[in-house]
Image (cartoon, grey):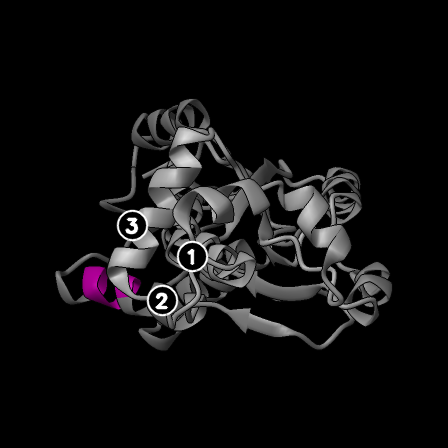
Amino acid sequence: MRDVAARAGVSLKTVSRVLNREPGVAESTAERVQQAAQELSFQLNFGARSLRRSDGRTATLGVILENVENPYSSAIHRAVEEVARERGLSVLAGSLDEDPRRERALVAAFVSRRVDGLVMMPTGTDHRYLLTERQAGTFMVFVDRAPGLIEADVVVTDNQAGAARGVRHLISGGHRRIAFLGDLLQIQTAQQRYAGYLDAMRGADLAVVQQDTVHDCTSASLGEAAVTALMRKADPPTALFTGQNFVT
């Protein structure tokens, strides 16, 4: 940074402000600093910088999602990445595959790299292991599902009300035999969507046929097999409510 300052003819503090995207530097001066940094092939070392900072921040976030291959998880990843990029932060991402042990391993891996915060789509039912990391200063926000046995900031949708509204729409179209295809029943969102399905069916005094209820549809191929079996019945359902995007 001293070399960059000397070449640009500015103070070390000015170089720091420009490279850290802080305000208070004239545009022409910032351009001169950036040109000098480019000529000298200078790049910030975030690891070294975090060691010098009194707050220990690393300008990185860890994003832990159900499966980054899933379009829904990918959309969340991209949204976090866009907001982080605007603020000069980098994003590390991993898939937990509905495995609480994998979730813990990913948390440990990201925390060991001193990420400033975690954005998590949690699995499992007990997240008290995160309390130690939170007390150590790691920020946490949960998306899509709430964590178990701890209080935390959560961003979710109303799955139960949304599912009920979808099923009522089918009922208003004249359907009385409506099948349900859902994800793993251990997942919060799957439980909530099934509860919404039941609310709508019972609210309309319609029978819930057990043979028309299929859980644990975790892929398109399982969904296809389940629907094929339903449609081959002598008296098949006339409508489907699907509670998982791959199944849909």
Name the residue beneath numbered marker 3.
31
Q: Is residue 56 above or below residue 222?
A: below
Task: Return the disc, 1 or 3, that comes first in the chain's sequence.
Answer: 1
Residue 102 showing in the rendered view = yes
Locate residue 114, reporting x and y percent.
74, 50
Magenta part of the chain? 166-171
- Distance CA(mark 3)–CA(mark 2): 10 Å
Q: Is residue 111 above or below residue 164?
A: above
Q: Is residue 206 above or below residue 98?
A: below
- Distance CA(mark 2)–CA(mark 1): 7 Å
At label 2, the amino acid type is Val
Q: Residue furthest left?
A: 173
Q: Is residue 68 left or right of residue 167?
A: right
Do the numbered discs 2 and 1 sit on residues whose CB atoms are within 8 Å? yes
Q: Which residue is nearer to you in this view: 51 or 231?
A: 51
Q: Is residue 134 left or right of residue 181?
A: right
Locate residue 179, reporting x and y percent.
36, 47
Name the residue beneath numbered marker 2.
25
Q: Which residue is nearer to you in this view: 146 or 137?
A: 137
- Determine which of the numbered discs, if any, sits on residue 92 in the image: none
- Determine which of the numbered discs, if any, sits on residue 18 in the image: 1
Q: Quadrant of residue 224?
A: top left
Q: Is residue 67 left or right of residue 117?
A: left
